[in-house]
Amino acid sequence: MRQADLRAEKKVDGHSILSRDTQAKMIQVAIEVFGAHGYEGASTRALAEKAGVNLASIPYHFGGKHGLYLAAARTIADYARERITGVVARLRDSHRADQTTRIDEALSSYIDLVIGASEPEAWTSFFVRCEHEADDAFRMIYEEAVVRFGRALTEAAAEAIGCDADDEGLRIRVAVVLASIVNFRTLRNMTLGTLGWDQFNPDRLERLNRTIRQFALRELLSKPG
């Protein structure tokens, strides 16, 4: 390959890396700004200034404000899918252990992911804003972070107690369990205040994990009335 071609290739590679870095920075800022102010309250100027880019960068990289908003949601959704895929696979692996044990282990892992995870609080704020709007961004994150696990949990519980996975009573109990777990993350300050704690630490998280699992197993494995 000629030297000129090599220089051109390196220039393209360098531009691609810079572009990816710029996009990653803009997405990080978008999560923070949309989480703090909501979609309508976040101006393109504020997004650009906080990311250290010019206004034209938003349509250039993402097609506009809405595209950046969805890219931010996709980042969180992809992260959730990566973390939860293994939990769902182990829950569905009937060769590993009995159904009750697999449900208990899956709940423990999911609780750790949701409550004990070290993701930025801005991610939680972003999700709460999306949930309030019930928009495409919410559905994107909800599908990966909640629905996939909830579906597998419902199927496992239905098999364990011998009922149909479409049983309304079971689906209500699964919804209660999932909501209680997610709320420990989204209502963190209320939880700490109710418990009289100043923060979560490993011992407290373990006690929460154990207590939530005990509650969840009672709910999920009770026979349909």
Image (tube, rainbow, N blue to C red):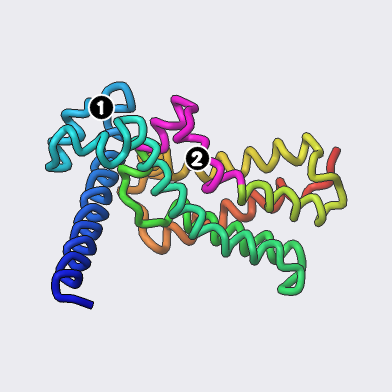
In the rendered image, the residue lying farthest to the bottom is: 1
Is 150 or 161 nearer to us in this picture?
A: 150
| Residue marked by disc 2 | 140
* Mark 1 residue type: Ala
Q: Is residue 198 left or right of residue 149?
A: left
Q: Which mark is residue 42?
A: 1
**Regarding mark 1 in the picture, which secondary structure is present there?**
loop
Identify which amino acid the numbered label 2 is placed on.
Met
* Badge 1 or badge 2: first in the primary sequence: 1
Q: Secondary structure at mark 2?
A: helix
- Decide if residue 194 is in sight here: no
Whether 100 is drawn above or below 33: the answer is: below
User: Is 107 left, or right, of 7 in this rendering?
Assistant: right
Q: Is residue 140 inside the magenta stretch? A: yes
Q: Residue at x 32, y 34 (%)?
A: 63
Q: Farthest front residue?
A: 2
Query: In the rendered structure, does residue 153 fall within the stretch colored magenta?
Result: no
